[in-house]
Amino acid sequence: MSSLSLPIETDRLVLRTFERSDIDDLCAYHMLPTMQRYVFSRTRDEAEVACALAIMRNHVSLQRPGDTLTLAMVRKGDKILIGHVSLNWSDATAGQGEVRFCINPSYSGQGFAKEALGALLDLAFDHFRIHRIFARCDGRSHHSIKLMQQMGMRLEAHYREHALFQGEWDEELHFAILDREWQRSAKVKELPLRHRVA
Amino acid sequence: MAFVLPQEPVLRLRQPLRKLLEGQENAMALYPTYPLHTERLTLRPFTRGDVDGVFAYRRLDEVARYLFDHPLSREECALAVQQRITQIGLAEVDDKIILAVELSETGALIGEVSLIWRSVEARQGEVGWIFDPGYQGKGFATEAANFMLDLAFGPGDMHRVSARCDVRNEASWRLMERLGMRREAHFREHAIFKSSWDEEYIYAILWQEWRRLRHPQEEIS
Ligand SMILES: CC(C)(COP(=O)(O)OP(=O)(O)OC[C@H]1O[C@@H](n2cnc3c(N)ncnc32)[C@H](O)[C@@H]1OP(=O)(O)O)[C@@H](O)C(=O)NCCC(=O)NCCS
């Protein structure tokens, strides 16, 4: 694959790889219990966040299946790290990728996640030539559900009690989008929150 | 997808099923005592004598169409039967019970049903089926699969049982709906299957849903 040119600029954000000095801003949201779901390693204290940061600092490109690219979302004006998005190249033969995202709740509700995820999907489809991108989320995470619908992603799966998470029955949704379905300026689609699969 | 109630009468376990290794923490093993009987069928472990019976349907294109396997040769059937002979109990994750389904009246081998232990901790199982086309359309697959659900939720103590199939395999997902399973997933182009894009359904049923089907009168909290 052709070389990746980073950082990526969006309207209000700079998306760049993680740096050692990101630890404080990362601690501000990564330790929250609600963040522990699709993280690369569990983080309950600063030392564990440092481990997670070390992992994410290595997520700099997609060379082979299994690789992950993780980009910090940095606000243009004040240079504050407000969250991150990542793209995992899960399967080469079928061109599959998974996106994940975390945002500091203090900065949510302003469209930053949508902006970052939009740039990540552009990258996935245009640069990495991925065929299908999927994302998982907690069935109770209404912000994430809304975000994925806004991205134009389809609800593909709604698992009920298929696993245990933190000692309780879990509910998980999968959303997906194919390369031919992705539109750069995806129109905001207001779908009902729990519409049926298929 | 509407929640479909099965039309058939409720299946009852005729045979007491034994749980070995009871009382172990978390891990519950399932070793049914064979043969098992339903109204019209006998479910039993495969034996070496089943190779020709299996070959009779596993060699067919129409049977293999939505299976991961291509149509099998007789040698491949012998190998498949060999593997199945010991797949009769669940002791740890990914173990499978794959049973030969016989028509009780004639003793003819008409297909197989399976139950896989997908997660011990979360008590998850997966069911599957392959039947001889000569014996399809008579509710035999439904009868055998219902019994596997009873095995999974009863003595197997499972919490959720799922099944998957190609979207085009209407016979299979209609069977899932007859069993009272709900469609939980519809994946599009998420993988390659036999050189083209795969499109797949996943259906599932929870313990409490199965209970309600078998005991419609009782209120379960
Ligand atoms: C999937 C498969 C097992 C389904 O078999 P099947 O014969 O359609 O299923 P059943 O035995 O439950 O029979 C149901 C049919 O018999 C009819 N039937 C007749 N008597 C019945 C009875 N007592 N109870 C229920 N159904 C009855 C039903 O109306 C139904 O027919 P319909 O589909 O025309 O409405 C079979 O098609 C198969 O083996 N396919 C090839 C292998 C395969 O693809 N396996 C699954 C991979 S995911």
Image (cartoon, coloured by chain):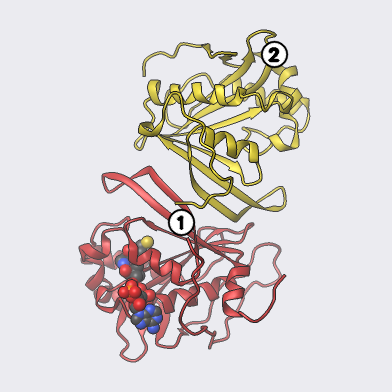
Chain colours: A yellow, B red
Q: Which mark is residue A80?
A: 2
Between A49 and B92, the residue placed more toward the observer is A49
Between B32 and B191, the residue placed more toward the observer is B191
Q: Which residue shows up at 27% across the image and 61% down it?
A: B64
Under mark 2, the amino acid is Ile
- In the displayed image of the protein, which residue is found farthest to the right? A45
> In the image, is B108 to the left or to the right of A85?
left
Q: Position of residue A42 (x, y in %)?
A: 69, 35
Whether residue B101 is visible to the viewer of this picture, yes or no, is no
Q: Is residue A178 above or below residue B96?
A: above
> In the image, is B214 to the left or to the right of B201?
right
Q: Position of residue B46 (x, y in %)?
A: 37, 75
Q: Which mark is residue B65?
A: none
Letter of the chain that mark 1 sits on in the rendering: B
Q: Which residue shows up at 36% across the image and 26% down it?
A: A129
Q: At numbered mark 2, what does the secondary structure look like: helix, strand or loop?
A: loop
Q: Which residue shows up at 26% across the image and 44% down it?
A: B195
